[in-house]
Amino acid sequence: MAFTDIHIVKNGAVAVITVDRPKVLNAIRYATMLEINQALDEIENDPALRVVVITGAGDRAFISGGDISIMARDEGYIETLTEVPKGQAICSRIEEFPKPVVARINGAALGGGTEIALCCDIRIAADTAVMGLPEIKLGIIPGYGGTQRLPRLVGLGKAKELVLTGDTIRADEALRIGLVNQVVAAGELDAAVDRLTQKLGARGPVALHMAKVAMNTGPQADLKTGLDIEARCFSLCFGTADRREGMNAFMEKRPAKFQGH
């Protein structure tokens, strides 16, 4: 499939989606989100692909935010309210995707860039990266889930500080507050992402999916409901060939060869 704003590279079990709009530092527009959604369709339907990486082209930006040249057009409440939920739904799809999604944050991840990173399961940032939700400086607020996911990840107080001031933070501060999982030197980013994706690719695909369902869904409910969700996901794993392979491999002292069945 031919894309305009992104491209996909497949390497073994790993698919890398790269936002490639260098003239605007990989800023996203609605068409970019639609292409990401199409890429996810392709990846989800390929059982050989087990891990997704989302990144930006070049070394200056992951995703620098929304494309201001488009957002500056005189669209009103109704037009925006029609389009924004569709973009939110694509972000939610990234979050709920049945395969692990890793954010390779190679530079500026601002506005929509931070919001897409928040949807990913694990975030690895170069030490040159900066992150933040500066929409307030434009007279708007985050619209792709930033006001909802950021407080759940870093706590309400810190999230309010970042959203209400519009301040950006460096990678080391993002690590300190739990916004990213790991920070590495820019030259070591690819190696760090490769180590993680190889590890994830060796795990059982069904169990990875069930773990994501339990962790994405359970914290939105009370503990009793969350435990019920966990029990159901755990039990579903027991009906799989992957569970038998994993346990047999453990008993036989060999690496498991999961097939996603």
Image: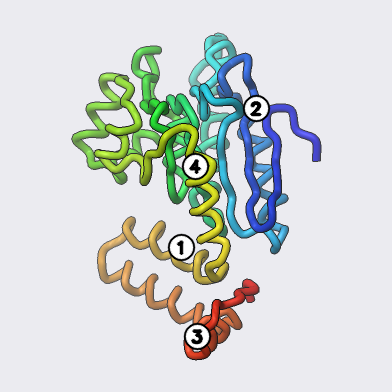
Q: Position of residue 184 (x, y in %)?
A: 40, 39
Compared to residue 36, the image places residue 49 above or below, namely below
Q: Position of residue 85 (x, y in %)?
A: 52, 36
Which kind of residue does numbered mark 2 sit on? Asp
Contact (Cβ within 8 Å) of mark 3 with mark 4: no
Image-quadrant location for residue 241: bottom right
Closest to the camera, between mark 1 and mark 2, is 2
> At numbered mark 3, what does the secondary structure look like: helix, strand or loop?
loop
Contact (Cβ within 8 Å) of mark 4 with mark 2: no
The residue labelled by disc 2 is 20
Image-quadrant location for residue 179: top left
Q: Residue at x 54, y 41 (%)?
A: 190
Contact (Cβ within 8 Å) of mark 1 with mark 3: no
The residue labelled by disc 1 is 213
Contact (Cβ within 8 Å) of mark 1 with mark 4: no
Quadrant of the drawing holding the C terminus: bottom right
Camera-side residue of 108 and 79: 108
